[in-house]
Amino acid sequence: MNDTIQFEYVEDGVLHTDDDYQAVFTHCKEVLERLGGKLKHDDMQAGKLEAAWRYGVNPFGLRGTLLFRGIEKGGMSVTVKAGFKDSFNTSKATTQKVQEIMAALLGQAEAVPATSNTSGIAPPSQADAPVNPSRNKTKLAMALLSFFGGGLGLHKFYAGCWGWGLIYLISCFFIPGVAAVIAFIEFIRVLTLSPEKFEAKYNQATPGAFTFIW
């Protein structure tokens, strides 16, 4: 029987393990701190770890997030994401940070004692709290695009709803101003969303071309 925590590479940004959730969560937290991250979110019940690193002049601008979810076949998935807290995700730094965290988890797992699943703590179910590792939309970016480019549908293209983006863009030529007014209302709506609700609406699900996120 294995006496160390074992991670299995599933795909870019996703690992799998059958080991005890509490032990895995604690190990992942230690890895983030070992990589120089400052913990900003530590919630075992919600299955979320988040650490921040300096990026440019922002001391906590680059975030690395680990999301833990129980899966149907047993064990759990660990999704590694990275993004900028107060900026657009336009840099390779996010991809590099995901790769750095993944490498650290895979490379150091052998030396970490594992325990049987006796803690009684389980990660959230993937069915109840789905995770899409490829989306790193930020509230600031969405708000800025809604305010300054909403009339052209830029915020819709950013969210992945390109069908609505085209409708907003075309409307500029036939009914000028209407799309801008709607986008301003959406701007206010985005500002009122809590971080959790924004995450659920824009990052935990992949919208279709004509999905209207509200």
Image (cartoon, rainbow, N blue to C red):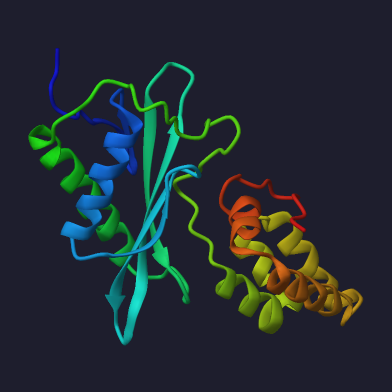
Q: Quadrant of residue 4?
A: top left
Image point 68% across, 79% down: which residue?
149
Q: Nearer the viewer, residue 27 or 165?
A: 27
What quarter of the picture does the N terminus occupy?
top left
Image point (61%, 44%), residue name: 205
Quadrant of the rendered image containing residue 107 = top left
Observer-nearest of 42 and 65: 42
**Residue at the right extreme, as displayed:** 175
**Residue 5, horizontal then vertical, whole percent:** 19, 30
Place of residue 152 in the rendered image (x, y in percent of width and height, measured from the top left)? 72, 75
Q: Residue drawn 84% across and 73% down?
A: 182
Q: Residue 33 at what x, y percent from top left?
A: 22, 59
Look at 89% across and 76% down and name the residue there.
Answer: 178
> Which residue is outermost to the top?
1
Residue found at the far front of this picture: 119
Could one spot residue 160 in this view of the protein? no
